[in-house]
Image (cartoon, rainbow, N blue to C red):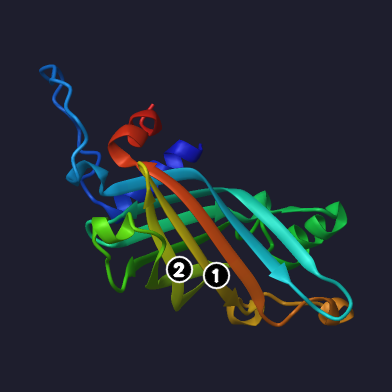
Amino acid sequence: MKYALLLLLLSAVMPGAYAQAPANPAPAAATAPTAAMLQRYTTANGQTTFFSTAPLEDIEALNSRVAAIFDLNTGQLAFSMLMKDFQFKNSLMQEHFNENYAESEKYPRARFTGTLVTRPDEATLRSGPQPVYVQGQLTIHNVKRKVRVPGTLQLRGNDLVVTSKFSVAPADYKIKIPALVRNNIAKSIDISVILTCQPGPTGTASIAK
């Protein structure tokens, strides 16, 4: 299922990436990866956490099943996650999140599609984490909003490491907080994203299976 999601994301962000191959392609000689081959990166195990601090209680959850695709050549990226994959330390809190706030059965996914505002070159990305901005559309609770968020990119060996920290207001996405627990949940939720993505040509071989 997670690989099918990556294929869907890839076809949306990079059309034609999975065009049908000839029925009997001629065997190709093995070649070393080139810079062009390393432009597309994917992961099915990215991490997103959210943290809410309030006078009565702090709330934190982790989702380790974030599917993402990043094309450094075009600067386009996309990620998607199931809301029910957020794990809480408190099982009752997790139940309330899915049933009362996120309404995970009705609105199962959060998605983001966007583009880098600036694109550092490969040499710069290999020198350390580079600050970037991404602008695009964030969809939560079936509400779509344009956002511009900061982040960092780094090429570490064969991997592309992506991080971002930003805030989301539940009210902006029509997430209603019951009056009884309103003081327990911050008006703005801190979001952290960490994606360690592998090069597309080698990673997508397993995705296509």
Per the image, label 2 sits on a secondary structure element best described as strand
Q: Amino acid at mark 2?
A: Gly
Residue 53 versus residue 87 in the image, above or below: below
User: Residue placed at 45% from the left, 37% from the top?
Assistant: 3
Q: Residue at x 19, y 30 (%)?
A: 32
Q: Residue at x 77, y 75 (%)?
A: 53
Q: Quadrant of residue 170?
A: bottom right
Residue 108 visible in rendering: no
How far across and how far down the image is residue 150, in percent? 45, 74
Comparing 160 with 46, the one in front is 160
Q: Earlier in the sequence, mark 1 or mark 2?
A: 2
Q: Which mark is residue 165?
A: 1
175 sits left or right of 20 in the view: right
The location of residue 72, given as percent across then percent down, is 28, 56
Q: List x then y, in percent, for residue 111.
A: 49, 61
User: Quick check: can you spot residue 128?
Assistant: yes
Q: Are marks 1 and 2 in contact (CB under 8 Å)?
A: yes
Packing grade of label 1 (10 A; few <14, some 14-19, many >=20) is some
Task: Give the percent coordinates (x, y) of residue 45.
Answer: 53, 44
Q: Residue at x 39, y 60 (%)?
A: 153
SS label for mark 1: strand
Compared to 39, does 49 lie above or below?
below
Observer-nearest residue: 119 or 40?
Answer: 119
The answer to which image quadrant residue 95 occupies is bottom right
Q: How far apart in space, not on screen, are marks 1 and 2 (Cα)?
A: 7 Å
Q: 110 or 45: which is nearer to us?
A: 45
For label 2, the residue is 151
